[in-house]
Image: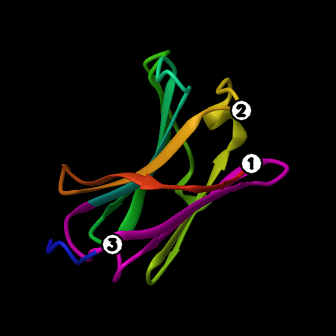
Amino acid sequence: MSNHDALLKQVSITATDDNLVARFEIEGNIPGSGAYVVGLVAASEDYSSQRRLGIEFMNGEAISFYSFNHSLSAEENYDVKGVEHSGNVITGNFPKSAIHGLSEGHVMTAFSEADGRDFQSGVPVNESL
C-alpha cells in the first residue's frame, strides 16, 4: 500500500441515544486486497484506562467489528451489520458501553493499520459526546 492510499483524512464520533457513531473519512478507497483496520483509542487522561475500538476489513469487506478494554483484557465483538462503508467513508455504530467508565476528560485519537503494520496513529478525532 502506498503512503497515499487509504490515509485517514478526518475522523469524528457522535453519541446517539444508543450508540457511538464513529465516522472515518479516508483518502482514496478501502484497499481491495489485504487487511486494513481503522479505529479509535480512547483513554483516561493518565492512560491508566484504555479502550480500543476497531473495524477490520479483508479484501475490501468488513470482517470484524470490536472493542477491547485494556483494563479488563477483554474483547467484545459486534455484528458487522453495525458497519457501513461506501467509497471513502467508513461508519461504525458502536454501543455506548464500548467506552463505559472513561471520564469526561478522556483522550481520543484514531488509527489505521495495513496488513498488520501500523499505518497511522494519533489522528485527531472531532468529538460530540
Residue 45 among magenta residues: no
Looking at the picture, how far across and down is residue 124, in whole percent? 48, 55
Q: Is residue 65 visible?
A: no
Q: Which residues are magenta?
A: 6-35
Which residue corresponds to mark 2?
A: 104
Task: Inspect the image, locate mark 3, and give the three-letter code of the amino acid beneath it.
Answer: Gly
Q: Residue at x 43, y 18 (%)?
A: 73
* For the residues bearing labels 3 and 1, Cβ distance under 8 angstroms: no
* For the residues bearing labels 2 and 1, Cβ distance under 8 angstroms: no
In the image, is 84 to the left or to the right of 39?
Answer: right
Q: Earlier in the sequence, mark 2 or mark 1?
A: 2
Above or below 58: residue 99 = above
The image shows a total of numbered marks equal to 3
Q: Nearer the viewer, mark 3 or mark 2?
A: 2
Residue 129, disc: 1
Residue 9, disc: none
Task: Inspect the image, locate mark 1, and give the three-letter code of the amino acid beneath it.
Answer: Leu
Q: CA distance from mark 3 to mark 2?
A: 35 Å
Above or below 123: residue 5 = below
Looking at the picture, how far across and down is residue 57, in whole percent? 35, 61
Foreground of the two, 28 or 59: 28
Looking at the picture, how far across and down is residue 87, in whole percent? 44, 84
Task: Inspect the image, locate mark 2, and give the three-letter code of the amino acid beneath it.
Answer: Glu
Which residue corresponds to mark 3?
A: 60
Q: CA distance from mark 3 to mark 1?
A: 29 Å
